[in-house]
């Protein structure tokens, strides 16, 4: 049947619209690619904000910038800006604007290392903070000069580790945790089974605090040219006002921000009437690293493994936080292993652990990849329990002295909610077939036979899986691994002494080792191929893949807003409640024994 004139007209119009859309998309892509040619004035001062969460890696989409969509700054991006500024002749100096940060002490060490590497360029790098806490000042002290306003305060007052327990609340609610754990130090369930620290938990936390406190004192003393005893006295008499901090030698000047810019103008040879040329991190980020001779050459995959470990795809939620999905990482590792253009793999781990099954699936993919090319692990703030499990078979493991790692152990359990049901007037009955059909009953404690089944499962995971795999990966006896295990957490410094890691350093050190193992030229940079690749703006808009930012319902947005308004301690307890909800399905956990917050 002949096509009608109207239909032909609609087809032509439709074709024109589609062609216009395609041309527009191509145009946007070309514009996005040209962003890397951002103009940077000569003798500029790069102002880098160091504040907030700074997650290890956040994929950046140039098209999002075009549409004015703000993208979160990441820790890896911050380090890259310093690398670029070091070799960029247009950058005359760097000013670190340091505010409250929530990244850990491992990243603090790594950032200090990057600051000192920048100083090798001979360019000035100053730090400015208005209210310096332990970590903020620790980072700032690595700079050439440190400033704060005369009325600012430095709270370098030592460490306090806060561990919370919820057993009292559970008792009031009639909820009884039923738990099996292997290892004297595997204290993850203690938040729900105890009201105070166990002997083992107290021993480990004291050991960690001693190590971190010693590093804080020694590094501040070295950077500020003070004695260790003087630094300890300063800590014991803190806080200190800006004017007092200057007299004590903690800072180089009690100055306001405009006065620091005036000093930088003189340092950089500006005329008195000239206006200082500043460039922000968000703008400088648009300068492509390859335009400066960086991030070019042979390809090395950098796979970011961040968050609590779970089966399935990586995701994030207000309660559970960011999760590290085994499917996502296995797919990324397999792709990198199969891609012949990729010469080595660097696995960047920032995880407290999680599902034993998911950890083993990732371990297996890394074991296969290692047969084809070198695999090097770079540990960030934490790579413990399941996070250590997925690291143990790498060719080399790199961590910062303050990284928390180890925690070789396992636990499983379930919440018994009969008392809660009685309290609210709920009754239930089970009708079962099969001797072990009642393993996951929420209202009944395990029978002796059921507990024996779960104990057998825990023993198998620890003694037949975790310990032997660490022993093989680290070339140790199983007896030694067991003595270092038992759920004990180590700092990176302690882990190196015990043979659990190989080298101190951050991501750059791991890439350097990967280049060496892959027999790549040491004096040439490599192209970092980031995996898993982030979704483009169009993928998000169309609702493809894992991120549904653009397709969230109003109800979901409202729930997230309520959750984010809760105190952090409440959100943390809800995350552990989510953990127990997964455990009641029989899932064994390899998790950091506590969410340790050291301030």
Image (cartoon, rainbow, N blue to C red):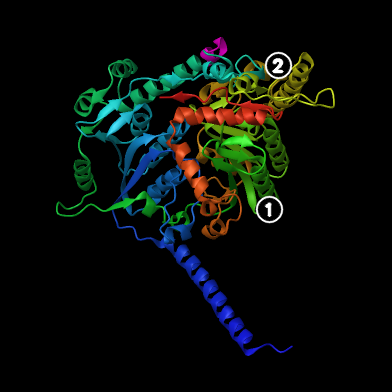
Q: Between residues 543 and 263, which one lies in front from this camera angle?
A: 543
Label drawn at residue 515: none
Q: Is residue 50 left or right of residue 396?
A: left
Badge 2 is on which residue? 479
Front position among marks 1 and 2: 2
Q: In this rendering, is residue 23 above or below 73?
A: below
Which part of the image, by quadrant, shows the N terminus?
A: bottom right
Residue name at image x 42 percent, y 56 percent: 286
Q: Is residue 198 magenta?
A: yes
Q: Is residue 441 left or right of residue 508?
A: right
Number of marks in the rendered image: 2
Prevailing SS of the magenta stretch:
helix
Badge 1 is on which residue? 340
Residue name at image x 76 percent, y 25 percent: 430
From the top left corner, tell me how far across and down residue 488 is, in percent. Answer: 59, 19
Furthest-front residue in this view:
425
Furthest-left residue in this view:
273
| Disc on the earlier residue, 1 or 2 | 1
Q: Between residues 84 and 164, which one lies in front from this camera angle?
A: 164
Which part of the image, by quadrant, shows the C terminus?
A: top left
Q: In this rendering, is residue 285 above or below 358?
A: below
Find the magenta span and give its range: 197-204
Residue name at image x 20 percent, y 24 percent: 244
Within 10 angstroms of label 1, few (less than 14), some, or many (20 or more) residues?
Answer: few
Give SS at disc 1.
loop
Q: Is residue 97 magenta?
A: no
Residue 463 location, quadrant: top right
């Amino acid at each position: 049947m002949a096509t009608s004139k109207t239909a032909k007209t609609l087809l032509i119009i439709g074709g024109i619209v589609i062609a216009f859309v395609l041309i527009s998309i191509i145009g946007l892509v070309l514009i996005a690619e040209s962003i890397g040619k951002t103009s940077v004035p000569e003798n500029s001062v790069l102002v880098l904000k160091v504040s907030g969460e700074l997650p290890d890696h956040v994929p950046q989409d140039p098209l999002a910038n075009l549409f004015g969509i703000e993208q979160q700054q990441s820790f890896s991006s911050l380090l890259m800006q310093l690398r670029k500024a070091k070799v960029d002749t247009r950058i005359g100096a760097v000013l670190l604007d340091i505010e409250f940060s929530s990244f850990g002490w491992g990243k603090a060490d790594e950032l200090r290392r990057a600051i000192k590497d920048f100083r090798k360029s001979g360019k000035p790098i100053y730090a400015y903070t208005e209210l310096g806490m332990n970590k903020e000042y620790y980072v700032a002290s690595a700079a050439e000069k440190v400033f704060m306003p005369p009325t600012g305060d430095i709270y370098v007052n030592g460490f306090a580790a806060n561990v919370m327990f919820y057993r009292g609340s559970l008792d009031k609610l009639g909820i009884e945790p039923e738990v099996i754990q292997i290892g004297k130090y595997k204290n993850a369930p203690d938040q729900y089974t105890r009201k105070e620290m166990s002997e083992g938990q107290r021993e480990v936390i004291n050991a960690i605090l001693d190590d971190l406190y010693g590093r804080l004192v020694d590094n501040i003393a070295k950077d500020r040219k003070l004695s260790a005893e003087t630094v300890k006295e300063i800590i014991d008499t803190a806080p200190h006002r800006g004017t007092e901090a200057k007299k004590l030698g903690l800072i180089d000047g009690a100055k306001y921000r405009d006065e620091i810019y005036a000093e930088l103008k003189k340092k950089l040879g500006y005329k008195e009437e000239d206006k200082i040329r500043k460039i922000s991190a968000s703008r400088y980020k648009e300068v492509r690293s390859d335009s400066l001779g960086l991030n070019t050459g042979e390809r090395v995959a950098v796979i970011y493994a961040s968050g609590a470990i779970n089966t399935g795809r990586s995701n994030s939620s207000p309660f559970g936080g960011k999760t590290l999905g085994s499917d996502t990482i296995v797919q990324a590792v397999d792709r990198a292993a199969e891609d012949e253009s990729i010469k080595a793999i660097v696995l960047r781990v920032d995880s407290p652990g999680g599902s034993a099954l998911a950890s083993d699936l990732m371990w297996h993919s890394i074991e296969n990849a290692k047969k084809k090319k070198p695999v090097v692990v770079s540990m960030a703030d934490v790579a413990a329990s399941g996070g250590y499990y997925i690291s143990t078979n790498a060719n080399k493991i790199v961590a910062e002295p303050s990284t928390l790692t180890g925690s070789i152990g396992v636990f499983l359990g379930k919440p018994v909610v009969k008392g809660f049901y009685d309290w609210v007037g709920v009754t239930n009955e089970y009708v079962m077939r099969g001797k072990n059909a009642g393993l996951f009953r929420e209202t009944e404690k395990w029978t002796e036979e059921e507990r024996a089944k779960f104990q057998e499962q825990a023993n198998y995971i620890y003694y037949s899986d975790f310990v032997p795999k660490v022993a093989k990966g680290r070339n140790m006896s199983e007896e030694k691994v067991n003595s270092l295990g038992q759920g004990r957490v180590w700092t990176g410094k302690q882990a190196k002494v015990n043979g659990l890691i190989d080298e101190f350093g951050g991501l750059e050190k791991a890439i350097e080792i990967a280049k060496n193992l892959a027999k790549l030229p040491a004096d040439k940079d490599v192209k970092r191929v980031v995996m898993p690749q982030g979704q483009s703006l169009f993928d998000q808009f169309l609702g493809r893949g894992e991120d549904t930012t653009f397709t969230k319902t109003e109800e979901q947005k409202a729930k997230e807003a309520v959750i984010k308004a809760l105190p952090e301690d409440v959100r943390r307890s809800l995350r552990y409640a989510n953990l127990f909800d997964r455990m009641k399905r029989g899932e064994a956990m390899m998790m950091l024994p506590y969410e340790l917050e050291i301030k």
